Image: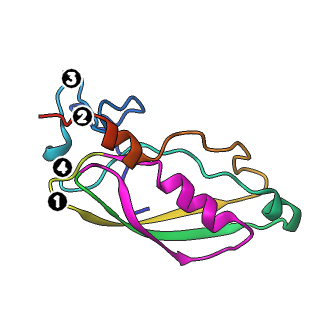
Amino acid sequence: MAAIAQKRPDCQPTTVINNGVCIDKNGKDCSGRESQTHICYAPDPQYTQEALKANIKGLVRLTAIVGTNGCAAKIKVVGSLGYGLDESAVFALERFRFRQPAKPMSISVEFDFDPQLSSRNAVTASKCEEVADRSPSVK
């Protein structure tokens, strides 16, 4: 995965999102401190029943642009598995939250699907853009 979920003591990724922005331990927006895109929230894509019946295992590869709102846009499937897994991967990536970059950034993401290990739970989070659009901007 090109987007990195690395821990830093001054600005750790967190699943608690405040207006779509990762907040440091002092409650301040720390998104402008890094040139890499960091993941704040990353739901697991659902492994579909169709894929389970066919015992499908492998990678779905996606590309996207992370906008200044911290949301993935222009998502494209560049490595497909079928069986509903491509759509599941796109559905999950639409709900990822990234640290807001100073300018839009290209990313590549791989989702590894395995019938023994992958989540069968439906992703219930709102789309990132829906959360970002209804939240006041952080200054």
| Left/right of residue 13 with respect to residue 84 in the rendered view | left
Q: Looking at the image, do the residues carrying marks 2 and 1 touch, with CB atoms under 8 Å apart?
A: no
Q: Nearer the viewer, mark 4 or mark 1?
A: 1
What amino acid is at disc 2?
Answer: Cys
Q: Looking at the image, do the residues carrying marks 4 and 2 touch, with CB atoms under 8 Å apart?
A: yes
SS at mark 1?
loop
Stretch of the chain drawn in magenta: 69-98
Task: Check the image and name the residue furthest to the top.
Answer: 26
Q: Quadrant of the N terminus?
A: bottom left
> Which residue matches tag 2?
11
What amino acid is at disc 4?
Answer: Glu
Residue drawn at x 22%, y 53% is 68
State the image coordinates of residue 61 (x, y, percent, origin top left): 53, 71
The quadrant in which residue 75 appears is bottom left
> Which residue matches tag 1?
103
> Which residue matches tag 3?
27
Residue drawn at x 47%, y 54% is 94
| Left/right of residue 106 with respect to residue 86 in the rendered view | left
| 4 or 1: tag closer to the N-terminus | 4
